[in-house]
Every structure is written in C-alpha cells, then in structure tokens.
C-alpha cells in the first residue's frame, strides 16, 4: 500500500505545476488511463471474440432448429461449437476483472487515515473544493447539494449520466448482435446476462455516490475510456 501511495504522490508532484491543488486528482486520472492502456490489448482480443461470437449466430440458429425439442442437447451442442471455434462466451469479462486490483488499491488508499503508521497525506488533497477521501454524503453535510463540494459531485454525476447513456446504447447494440435474446436457451445464464449487461453502465452513478472521491474518479475515467473504446473497436 505504501508503494502505491508513493506512486500517486510522485505523479501528483509531477502534475502539480499544471493542476496545482488538484494535482493528486489528476494523478488518479492518469493512473487510471495507464491501467486502461495496459489492458487495452485484452480489450481488443475481447472485441475480436465478440465479433467471432456474432459470426457463429447462423450456426447456432441451425442448432436451435435441429434440437428444438431437446434443450439439454442444444446446450451441449452450442458449448461444443464454442469450444471447436475457440470462442469463449464470457471472454469479455477479463479486461474488467483485471482492473479490480487498481480500483481496490485506490479505494483502500483514500479510505485509511494512516499508511505505514504515518498520517495519510493524500487525504488532504482535493478536486477543486472536494477532498479526495470524502464521499458524497460528506459533501452534503458540508455545504449541502449546491455547496462547493456538492457542485463537484453534481458535475461528476452529470458526466457519468452522459457516459452511462452512451455505454447503455453501445452495450445494447453489441450484446444483441452477439448474444440474441433467446440465447439463454442455448447457453445457461447468457440470456439473463444479455438483458442485464446494458444496464450495468448506470451502476456507476451509485458507485460514484458511495465510494471516496478518488475511487469515483477512477470509475468515471475508466467508464469513459471503456465507452470510447467500444465505439472504436465495435464499429
């Protein structure tokens, strides 16, 4: 944890001439972009897999007609087809899972008052008027909804809403193309996944409200990157 804290502080020092009091917030955003850049090759591989799953849909449709009266045989046939074509139905989850350690490190780092027995100096940093270690409830208690810190959160909520809406539309197009609504009859659980995935974008609104501001910045930046990335990779 102290190593990660030192990394954030070093980045903040480098960015201080440009961002002044918000240098630590800029450092969190920069770290997020670096994490997303590192997992980008996996995102590209995931996009290729998604397109491969889309290409399999005619064959899956044929299997569905062939085994219409035997759901268990249909499930086995579809899974065998995915195995034969070396396509994983859930490969797209990997880039998101690999980002979790960075998010939890930031969450923990900006939740602890001390690090290595010393005062956590990062908690003194702010994004404009909002401390990076505070949550939305803290902003509401210190100036209210339209107070200095509250306005920072309102700006984040507005940004997240716009990004979530674009992410929702993009996910609907991508999932409907690669996993038809009735695909759950062929692969267990994928039908529910198809219906739920587009709405996952809006969970960022809840997350931003309950985590420390530094972790919220990670979520917002990562979500914006992911939305733009999907637009480019799935066009």
Image: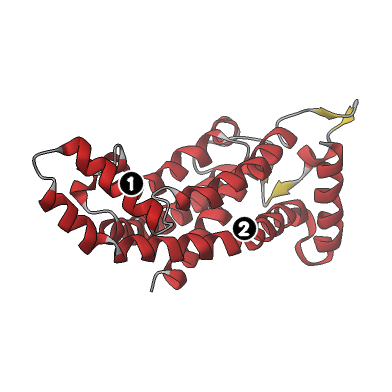
Tell me which residue sits at (45%, 66%) in the image.
48
Q: Which element carries disc 1, helix, strand or loop?
A: helix
Q: Position of residue 36 (x, y in %)?
A: 62, 58
- Dividing the picture into quadrants, the one containing residue 131 is top right
Q: Position of residue 13 (x, y in %)?
A: 86, 57
**Mark 2 packing: few (<14 Cα in 10 Å), some, or many (20+)?**
some
Q: Which element carries disc 2, helix, strand or loop?
A: helix
- Using the numbered discs, state the Cα–Cα distance from disc 2 to disc 1 in whole angstroms: 27 Å
Tell me which residue sits at (64%, 63%) in the image.
37
Label ID, residue 209: none
| Residue 201 visible in this rendered orientation of the protein | yes
Residue 147 vs residue 168, the one in the foreground = 168
Tell me which residue sits at (47%, 51%) in the image.
91
Residue 157 vs residue 219, the one in the foreground = 219
Tell me which residue sits at (8%, 40%) in the image.
69
Left or right of 148 in this view: 118: right
* Residue furthest out toward the top: 117
Residue 102 vs residue 190, the one in the foreground = 190
Label ID, residue 79: 1
| Display coloring | secondary structure
Which quarter of the rendering shows the N terminus? Answer: top right
Residue 91 vs residue 134, the one in the foreground = 91
Q: Position of residue 167 (x, y in %)?
A: 39, 57
Q: Nearer the viewer, mark 2 or mark 1?
A: 1
Name which of mark 2 and mark 1 comes first in the sequence.
2
User: Which residue corresponds to mark 2?
Assistant: 39
Q: Position of residue 154 (x, y in %)?
A: 49, 48
């Amino acid at each position: 944890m102290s190593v990660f804290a030192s990394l954030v502080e070093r980045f903040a020092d480098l960015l201080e001439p440009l961002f002044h009091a918000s240098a630590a917030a800029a450092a969190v955003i920069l770290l997020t972009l670096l994490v997303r850049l590192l997992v980008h090759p996996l995102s590209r591989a995931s996009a290729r897999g998604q397109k491969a799953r889309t290409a399999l849909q005619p064959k899956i449709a044929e299997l569905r007609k062939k085994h219409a009266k035997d759901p268990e045989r249909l499930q086995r046939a579809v899974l065998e087809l995915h195995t034969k074509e070396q396509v994983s139905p859930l490969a797209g989850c990997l880039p998101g899972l690999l980002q979790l350690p960075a998010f939890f490190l930031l969450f923990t780092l900006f939740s602890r008052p001390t690090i290595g027995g010393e005062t956590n100096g990062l908690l003194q940093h702010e994004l404009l008027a909002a401390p990076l270690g505070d949550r939305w409830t803290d902003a509401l208690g210190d100036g209210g909804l339209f107070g200095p810190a509250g306005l920072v959160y309102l700006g984040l909520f507005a940004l997240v809403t716009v990004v979530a809406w674009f992410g929702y539309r993009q996910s609907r197009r991508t999932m409907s193309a690669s996993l038809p609504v009735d695909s759950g009859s062929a692969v267990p659980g994928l039908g529910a996944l198809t219906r739920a995935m587009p709405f996952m974008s809006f969970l960022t609104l809840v997350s931003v409200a309950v985590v420390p501001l530094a972790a919220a910045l990670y979520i917002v930046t990562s979500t914006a990157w992911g939305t733009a990335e999907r637009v480019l990779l799935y066009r």
